[in-house]
Amino acid sequence: MTIFRPCIDLHAGQVKQIVGSTLQAEQIPDTASHPTSLPTTSSSIASTNTDPSAAAKDPSSLLHALTKPAPAASSAEPALKENYVSHLPASYYAQLYRDAELRGGHVIKLGPGNDDAAREALGAWHNGLQVGGGVDEGNARRWIEAGAEKVIITSYLFPSARFSLDRLKAVLAALGGDREKLVVDVSCKRVEGKWVVAMDKWTRLTDMEVNQGKSRFSITMFATFVTIITITNLNTAHRSRGSRSALPATNAFAFGPCLDSIHILAPFCSELLIHAADKEGLQRGIDTELVACLGTWCRSVPAEYQPFAVTYAGGGRSIEDLENVKRLSGGLVDLTIGSALDIFGGKGVRFGDCVQWNCRQKVKTRPGDSG
């Protein structure tokens, strides 16, 4: 059943809400360019007179956190548009989600300088949050040991913007082969009516298409098989005429379509996280067609890999969007709402209403888990 999934987006060590399409792959965050400061001690947090437990029940108690507007983008980041910059630490939001029993939320590190903030969040809710951003086979296990429920793998899977199954297998192996600990982020941009996975803060397109993958992947595999057989036969004939040399090998995938994803990834992970990058942070409505397709594709995942969770993010602007996602996906896709939430300075959605929505669905997480 569709539930609300919370988020903690980190940029330059701070919790922010950013218009996704304005992120620049080459940006090097500079915390000194932002005048807001992070409270780092219990006394400074207490000075805000905020009780996370009470806040989960009464979002109006969070209004103090909404009075500080986002600072203007610095000259070092001329294109970056920040909807909201919090003066509260990541651990505050982690505790807020914990008190409201909102499991399955994601902590996303947008660039360098965010590891400490991510660890603070995981410390506030051990085994309750997923973490992504810069995760690879070398550090995936360390993030689990630091308290992440799951790790989210993104750009590492796409060296030179091409999907690497070997890298996916390596990350899974680093996690002891436990696919329940792994989430794959296939955030995408719409290109000529298709959804193509984007990497490097959604600035670079890859060769993978967000799709069911079964028929198109079979066609590609068939083309590969035919090519191999053809080259083998030609080489046999070539040698039979007395030549010792072989014909040059052909990269069969070079002429194939964009790689599809759902059926390729399902055996190696338990969830997909999908930001509609063109919608992210704009609060102009969700990508209804993508959500409907995700529901259909998720339903087609083989039973041996079920339950297979999918979380969509991008464009959420009202509590009605949860009902829309539920209807469009048949209850198989979850929704993250960011910039529109009152806890992030938004005016479209009350955090308390999202908590109540989840309570009405009679679930606390997907898949089921207790505190």
Image (cartoon, rainbow, N blue to C red):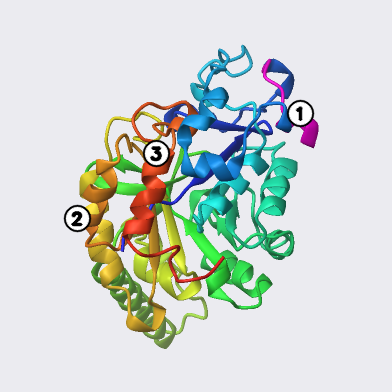
Decide if residue 342 is on the left or right side of residue 46.
left
Lower sequence index among marks 3 and 2 = 3
Rendering coords of residue 77 (x, y %): 59, 19
Task: Name which residue lies at 54% across and 57% down.
Answer: 157
Q: Identify which amino acid the numbered label 3 is placed on.
A: Ala
Rendering coords of residue 354 (x, y %): 38, 46
| Residue range highlighted in magenta | 34-45
Task: Name which residue lies at 30% across and 66% down.
Answer: 298
- Residue 44: assigned label: 1
Vertical placement of 367 versus 204: above or below? below
Asked if the stretch drawn in magenta spans residue 343, the answer is no
Lower sequence index among marks 1 and 3 = 1
Task: Name which residue lies at 50% across and 44% down.
Answer: 56
Q: Disc 3 designates what residue?
A: 277
Figure quadrant of residue 31: top right
Vertical placement of 216 versus 334: above or below? below
Rendering coords of residue 72 (x, y %): 56, 12
Do callouts 2 and 1 mark residues in contact (Cβ within 8 Å)? no
Q: CA distance from mark 2 to mark 1?
A: 44 Å
Q: Identify which amino acid the numbered label 2 is placed on.
A: Arg
**Helix, strand or loop for disc 3:** loop
Task: Name which residue lies at 69% across and 33% down.
Answer: 13
Vertical placement of 35 versus 41: above or below? above
- Residue 327: assigned label: 2
Q: Identify which amino acid the numbered label 1 is placed on.
A: Ser
- Depth check, mark 1 against mark 3: the one in front is 1
